[in-house]
Structures are given as structure tokens and as C-alpha cells.
Image (cartoon, grey):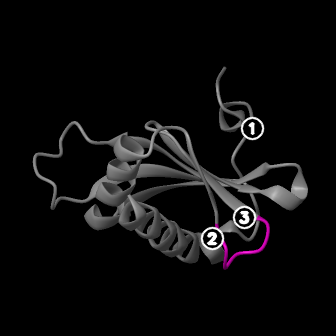
Amino acid sequence: MPPLIDKLSAAHTLQKVIDPADYNRIRLALRRIGTPLRLTLENMRCLDVILEDKYWICIDTCAHERPVMAWTSFQISERSALHESVTCELRLYHVHSGLVMGEVMENIGHELQQRLDAL
């Protein structure tokens, strides 16, 4: 079944460059912990993230798990080394999603690092 993000129109779509450390941490977690991987962002009320190989979705758990933003279309075919950034499409579904996208990514990194350290 395709994710909900394929059925909804994004309010805005951006080309985004993901820091290699963030991308590599998420890929490592998906390999070691499994996919899909759902994270509750402790410092961000009502926000969870669902991580898959092809997309990462931030959802609002207080609004029936409606998408807030989604990272998709990862351009990894041109990436030849782990230290290189990854370009992707960032779909924004909520009017204020742009205000929290950096904090969401920071919280994903923190939560994943804790889980990886616990393995």
C-alpha cells in the first residue's frame, strides 16, 4: 500500500540537501533496527517520524497522524562516498512545517543515536 503522502498534495515542495552524517545515521539505524522504524520525538509535542528506505515522514499524532512533512526521492545513485551529501525532495504539508524541519531532523538524530548506542 502506498503511503498517505502519495495521495495528498503538498503545500510546498523543496529540493533539500541532507547532511551526510544525518543520512548515514538513518540508513544505519534502518539496517540494524529494521524498517519501518517509528520514532516519537520527545521534545516535540505530537510529532512522530516514520522512517523507511524510500521516504521519511513526520506526522502529527494529535491530528489523526496527518503528514507534516516528508523527505522523498533521495538522489543516492550519484553518491560515490559516505561523506557526500544527499539531495532529496522535501514535501511540506502543514503551513508551519518549515519552522520545525531543522528541529525535527535534530531530534531524529538524537533519538536514533540513543537507540543505536543501546544495541
Q: Earlier in the sequence, mark 3 or mark 2?
A: 3
Q: Is 43 covered by the magenta stretch? A: yes
The residue drawn where x is 42% and y is 59% is: 16
Q: Residues within 10 Å of mark 3 (few under 14, many from 20)?
A: many
Q: Are marks 3 and 2 in contact (CB under 8 Å)?
A: no
Q: Main secondary structure of the magenta part?
A: loop
Q: Are marks 1 and 2 in contact (CB under 8 Å)?
A: no
* Foreground tag (1 vs 3): 3
Residue range highlighted in magenta: 41-46
Q: Which residue is mark 3?
A: 47
**Quarter where residue 20 is shown:** bottom left
Identify which amino acid the numbered label 1 is placed on: Leu
The percent coordinates of residue 108 (x first, y second) are: 51, 66
- In the rendered image, the residue lying farthest to the front is 119
The disc label shown at residue 8, or none: 1
The residue drawn where x is 17% and y is 46% is: 79
Compared with residue 84, is residue 67 higher up or lower down, i.e. above or below?
above
